[in-house]
Image (cartoon, helix red, strand yellow):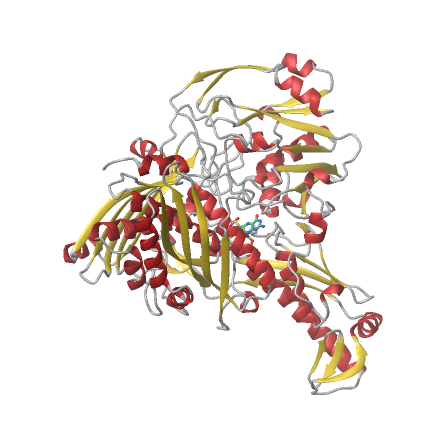
Amino acid sequence: MNKPFGNIDAPNHVTGKSIYVDDIPVMAGIVHIKIFDATIAHGIIKSLDFTEAEQVEGIVKIFSYKDITGENQIGGIIPDEPLLAENEVHFWGQPILLIAAENEDAAEEAFHKIKIAFEPLPVITNPREAFAKGKLLSPTRKFVLGNTSEAFMQCKYVFEGTTESNGQEHLYLETQGAYAHPTEHNSVRIFSSTQGPTAVQKTVGRVLGVGMNQVEVDVARLGGGFGGKEDQASTYGAMAALVAFVLKRPAKCILHRMEDMRMTGKRNPYSSDFKIGLDEQYKILAYDATFYQNGGAAADLSPAILERTLFHSTNSYHIPNVTATANSCKTNLPPNTAFRGFGGPQGMFVIESAIDFAAKQLNISPTIIQQKNLLKDGDEFPFGQIVGECEAANCWNELVANNQLEKLQADIESFNANNKLVKKGYSLMPICFGISFTNTMLNQARSLVHIYSDGTVGVSTGGVEMGQGLNAKMMQVAAKSLGISTSKIKLETTNTTRVANTSPSAASATADLNGKAVQDACKQINERLFAFIKEELKLNDEAIAFVDDILHINNITTTHNWKELILKAYLKRTSLSAKGHYATPVINFDKTIEKGHPFAYHVYGTALTTVTVDCLRGIYEIDAVKVIHDAGASMNELVDMGQCEGGLVQGIGWMTMEEVVYNEQGKLLSNALSTYKIPDIYAVPKDIDVQFLNTQKDNLAILKSKAVGEPPLMYGIGAYFAIRNAVLAFNPNSNITYNAPITPEKVLMGLYSKK
Ligand code: MTE
Ligand code: LUZ
Ligand code: MOS
C-alpha cells in the first residue's frame, strides 16, 4: 500500500509549483516594504531626515519607531531588541525605518533620499574583548561534574590550548519575508516564512499592541530555515503586520539576498580555552573548558544556544571531572542565532580539538583517545543525566570494522610516504546529540485531525515543513494510526488558529513532538469510531482495526471499508475530529543546580573522513565520508538519508570553506554569494556512504524513529581534522592552530609555516 516515499513536496518543488511567501497571489493595493538600515555598527543617530524621501512618487508612508502602535520590542528570551532603532544603533544592518511604497522602484528611490548622520561609538566584534569589558547578554553558566582541580593533579598528562570556530550564514534558498493583510475586527493575517508561527504571532501582538487572538499566522512551508527562522522571522512578520495594520492595506516585506546576509544573525562564533588531563592509559580524567560566545548586539536565542554548548561540551565521551563555563558576549554584530546544532557543534569542536592536541603532543593517533573514552550505559553526563541505550561504541565499532581502519591508516601512511606534494589525512568523528528542547517547557505539541464525511483526512500540526520531510512523516503517522493509506491524507498549512501555542519547529524534535500529538488525536477518533462500529455491527469484545482501509475483526478481513463506515459514522452524528496533545514525559532540568534529565534520548553516530590536500596550492578534496548513524528504527529512510547527507555537507561547509568576515568596523565583507562560498556539487565529498545502525530499542522517538535533523551536521567537524592531519603530514612543524574554518588559504599558510 504505502510505497516508500521521501519529501511529499518533491515533485512540486522540482516543477516549480510549491508556493513560498513571495509566490502567494497578493491582494489589490499591496504595499511593498523596504528596510532602511544602519551603515555603522555602533553609534548615536545624530539626525534623521526623510521628508524628501517621503515626497517620492509612490511612497505611501515611511515608518519610524514612533509609528509603532504597541511596544518597540522583539526580544524573545530577553527584551533587549527594538524592532526599529530609536536613538542608538548597535549593529551594521540594524533596521531604522520602513519604507512603505506602491512599488519596489519607488521604495528604492526613496531609500537613497533619506539623510542620516551618526556619532560613532566604539565597535566591539570580538567576544573576548566584550567579556573583558563586562558586556554579557546573559549570566555566565557553569556545568560541574566531580572536581577538576583535584583531578588534574592525578593526571599523567595535562594539555592546554585555545580554539576558534567561526559563524555560518544560513543561506536558506528562500530569504526572510512575510506578507500580511488586515482582517476584520482590528486583526491581521500574516503569511510568514517562519519556523515559529507562535513566535511571530506573539511578537506581532506585542508590536501592534493587540491580543494574540487578533493575529493569525499561516505557514505553508519554508525554502529552508536551518535555525535562521526560529526567532528572526518574527522581525519581518512584525514589519509586514505593522504596515498592514496601520495603513489598512496588504503589505509585503521580502528581503533581497544581500539584505538578508547583512541584516540577519548567523551561527554564533566561539572563542574557547581548554585544559585536558589524561592518565597513562589515555583515559581522560579531567576537562576544563571556557567558552566565549559571540552573541551579537542582542540576546535573541544566544542564552539557550550557550546552554546547549555546555550540554555537548564533552560530546560522546565520558569524563569524570568536568568544569565547563560559558559566557554569552555582547558585540556589535547582528544578533547571532540558532543554526543546526544550536551551540552543540561549537562545544564539540573544542573537545575534539583538545583530544587532537593531546594526541599530537603524545605522538599517538587521536582515535586511541577517542575510542578509549567513548560513553557507555551508566556513565553520567556533566549535567546529571545518566547514559542509557548508548550506541556510541556500536556506531564506532561498526564503522571501524566496515572500513578496515587499520588498513586504511596503513594505506594513508604509505601514500604520504610516496607522495611529496599531495598528502592524505583522515579522522574519526563520533557524535552524541541530545533530543529535546533544553528548555523543558518547550517540549509540547498539538495537532488537529479532521476526517471528512467522504473518508478523506486533513491533518494540521504545530510543526513547520522546511524541507526536512516533516509532512511526509506526519502523513505516515496518521496513516498508521488510522489504518488507512497515505493517499487519503492531506497535510494542511501550519496555522495559529488551528493549532495554538506551538513551539518552534526546531531542536530536531518536530516529528517526535507533533507526531505524538497526531497519534493522540487519531487515538481519540479511533475510540469514538470503533464504539460506533461495534454498535453498528453488533460486536462485543472483538478486536477491531483498519488495515489498508479495510476493517479487520479479530485480525480477519471483512467486506467493510473505511469510506463506507466513516459516512455511516457521520450520519449517526459521531465526532470525526480531534485535537491531540503531547508533552514529553520524564524530562526535567533544574537551572539553579545545573542538573537534571533534560533529554528524551540521545542520537549517536560516527563518521570517517578521508581527504587529499594539494600541498602546492593549499586546495583540498574530501575523498570520502563513511558514516554509521543511529537512526533508531527509521520510519522514512529516504527522508532520513537526505537529512544525513545534507547535514553532513552543511557541517563540512561550516568547518572548511564558509567564512563569515566582518571588518573592524563591524561591516560584513562576505556579504554576497561571490564572497561567501558554500559547498557546491564539486565540493561535496566524492563518496558519501551513510549506513543506519538499525536498532529497535524502546525510546521516546516517534515510532522509534530517532530525530535526525541536526545531529548529522556534526559529522562535518571530522573534515576539519582530516584536512589538518594532511597538512601536518606535509609539514610536521606547521603552526596551524585550531581555528575553523580551515579554508584553502589557511591550509596554504599552514603548509609553509613554522612553529
Ligand atoms: N532540512 C532542510 N531541508 N531544511 C531545513 O531548514 N533545518 C534543520 C533540520 N534539517 C532544515 C533541515 C534544523 S536546524 C532542524 S532543528 C531540523 O531540521 C528541524 O526539523 P525536525 O525537528 O523535523 O528535524
Ligand atoms: N531551540 C531551542 C533549539 O529553543 N532550544 C533548544 O534546545 C534547541 N536545540 C536545538 C535547536 N534549536
Ligand atoms: Mo534548528 S537550529 O533547531 O532550527
736 or 381, nearer to the observer:
736
522 or 86, nearer to the observer:
522
564 versus 467 height, above or below: below
Q: Is residue 503 left or right of residue 461?
A: left
Q: Where's residue 366, x and y in %?
A: 29, 55
529 versus 268 height, above or below: below
Q: Residue at x 32, y 38 (%)?
A: 751
Residue 625 in view (yes/no): yes
Q: Is residue 109 left or right of residue 564?
A: left
Quadrant that contains the N terminus: bottom right
Where, by quadrant of the figure, is residue 567 drawn?
A: bottom right
Q: Is residue 519 left or right of residue 669?
A: right
Residue furthest toward the front?
Answer: 418
Q: Where's residue 188, x and y in %?
A: 70, 39
Residue 383 in view (yes/no): no
Q: Residue at x 68, y 53 (%)?
A: 10
Quadrant that contains the C terminus: top left
Where, by quadrant of the figure, is residue 395 drawn?
A: bottom left
Where, by quadrant of the figure, is residue 108 drawn?
A: top right
748 or 437, nearer to the observer:
748
Q: Where's residue 608, x and y in %?
A: 41, 57
687 or 140, nearer to the observer:
687
Residue furthest toward the top?
Answer: 52
462 versus 43 height, above or below: below
Q: Where's residue 423, x and y in %?
A: 35, 46
Count of numbered tags: 0
